[in-house]
Amino acid sequence: MIAGDDPLGWDTTAAADAYRDRDMRLAEKLIFPAVLQRLGRSPSPDRLVLDVGCGTGAIAARLAGGGEWTVQGLDPSADMLDIARADRPHPRVSYRLFDGRTLPWLADDSVDGAVCGLVYCTDPDDDRLAALTAEIHRVLRPGAPYLLADLNPTATGVGFSTVRHGEPGAVYTDGDTVPTQLRLRDGTTMTSATHYRSLDRYRSFLTEAGFPAPTVDLPTLPFDGTAEDAPAETRTAPYMILTTRA
């Protein structure tokens, strides 16, 4: 979708098709390595980790390949899952449609870790996110890690090389709908509808579900050039990574 058009909802076929072609360079450098490092390698290949809101399967494939986990990739979009199955099949990854709120097929204390990447920002429903966070806490074994990666709410309006979350100069409050531009691999952009939440709101989702307060990482890229040439992602974190444990 070209910038300036109405934002796409994430549960549409058009969004899934566009998202398949997104430029993932920043996420690959800033989110994926940090998630794998904090989760660690699986001590055995039968250890189960959830990729909640897996989309087209990018993180799920890394968890199975680089981390050697058995992965359930979950998403409420059938179109996203069709792309994940086609583009990122792996013998230790299963992709499953779910309602975005409940995990009824999983027993209490039965999962060894969970990852949720760029999901909370796409859901306008606080009650659904609160229910989902509580379900993740329910199914995790005591001490199992939960890694929540999302757009950095303190970086709205900043034009990064592959993403811009919100309009420059705009001020957003919890619950506001925010247009987010994503760069595609052909150099065009798509505009998606995301939803602003402050860091305090993210913390409250976790603590109200029973998790301890998370640690917060704001990764940026190194840069060896001059300050005038430095891209925004060397000065400001496009994403944040929250780490907590059940």
Image (cartoon, helix red, strand yellow):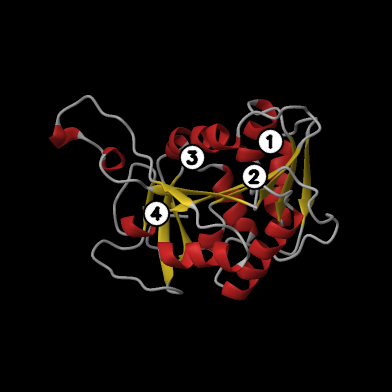
Which circle, 4 or 1, is nearer the viewer? Answer: 4
Q: Earlier in the sequence, mark 3 or mark 1?
A: 3
> Which amino acid is tagged 2?
Thr
Secondary structure of the residue carrying tag 2 is loop
Q: Earlier in the sequence, mark 4 or mark 3?
A: 3
Residue 67 location, x and y as percent?
65, 29
Q: Earlier in the sequence, mark 2 or mark 3?
A: 3
Query: In which quarter of the view is residue 235 placed?
Result: top left
Q: CA distance from mark 2 to mark 1?
A: 8 Å
Badge 3: how crowded within 10 Å, few (<14), some, or many (20+)?
many
The residue wearing badge 2 is 56
The residue wearing badge 1 is 87
Secondary structure of the residue carrying tag 4 is loop
Residue 71 location, x and y as percent?
74, 39
The residue wearing badge 3 is 31
> Which amino acid is tagged 1?
Asp
